[in-house]
Image: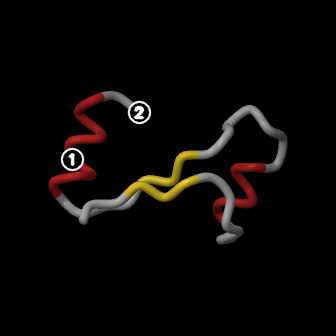
């Protein structure tokens, strides 16, 4: 994500899930709600 995307998420209280995009199956795991990676959200 670029700086503008991060700013928009911060301004609108949208959490961002940070995970290893290169690991096979991780996108599917995130979409199905498996808890992988780190959730970054405002306070």
Most extreme residue toward the bottom is 33
- Whether the residues at callouts 1 and 2 have beta carbons within 8 Å, the answer is no
- x, y percent for residue 25: 82, 49
Image quarter hosting the C terminus: bottom left
Residue 38 position by quadrant: bottom right
Front-most of residues 42 and 21: 42
Residue 1 percent across, percent down from the top left: 41, 33
Q: Against 20, is 39 above or below?
A: below
Number of the label disc, if any, that sits on residue 8: 1
Q: Residue at x 27, y 51 (%)?
A: 9
Q: Residues within 10 Å of mark 1 (few under 14, many from 20)?
A: few
Mark 1, secondary structure of its residue: helix
Percent coordinates x, y for residue 23 in the rendering: 79, 38
Kindly report the distance in space between the C-alpha atoms of the residues bearing marks 1 and 2: 11 Å
> Where is residue 32 shown, x and y percent of the image?
69, 69
Residue shown at 67%/37% (left/top)?
A: 21
Q: Residue at x 22, y 52 (%)?
A: 10
Residue at 21% from the left image edge and 42% from the top image edge: 7
Task: State the residue position of label 2.
Answer: 1
Q: On the picture, is 33 further left or further right than 14? A: right
Residue 28, image quadrant: bottom right
Return the mark for residue 18: none
Residue farthest left in this picture: 11
Is residue 9 placed above or below 14 in the rendered structure?
Answer: above
Q: Is residue 22 above or below residue 24?
A: above
In this rendering, would 21 be left or right of 43? right
**Element type at marker 2?**
loop
* Residue 27 position (above or below residue 3): below
List the single residue furthest toward the front.
Answer: 43
Which comes before the other along the chain, label 1 or label 2? 2
Whether residue 27 sits left or right of residue 5 in the image: it is right
Give the mark count.
Answer: 2
């Amino acid at each position: 994500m670029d700086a503008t995307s991060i700013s928009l998420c911060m301004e609108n209280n949208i959490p961002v899930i940070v995970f290893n995009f290169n690991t096979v199956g991780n996108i599917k795991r995130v979409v199905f709600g498996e808890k992988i990676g780190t959730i970054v959200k405002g306070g």
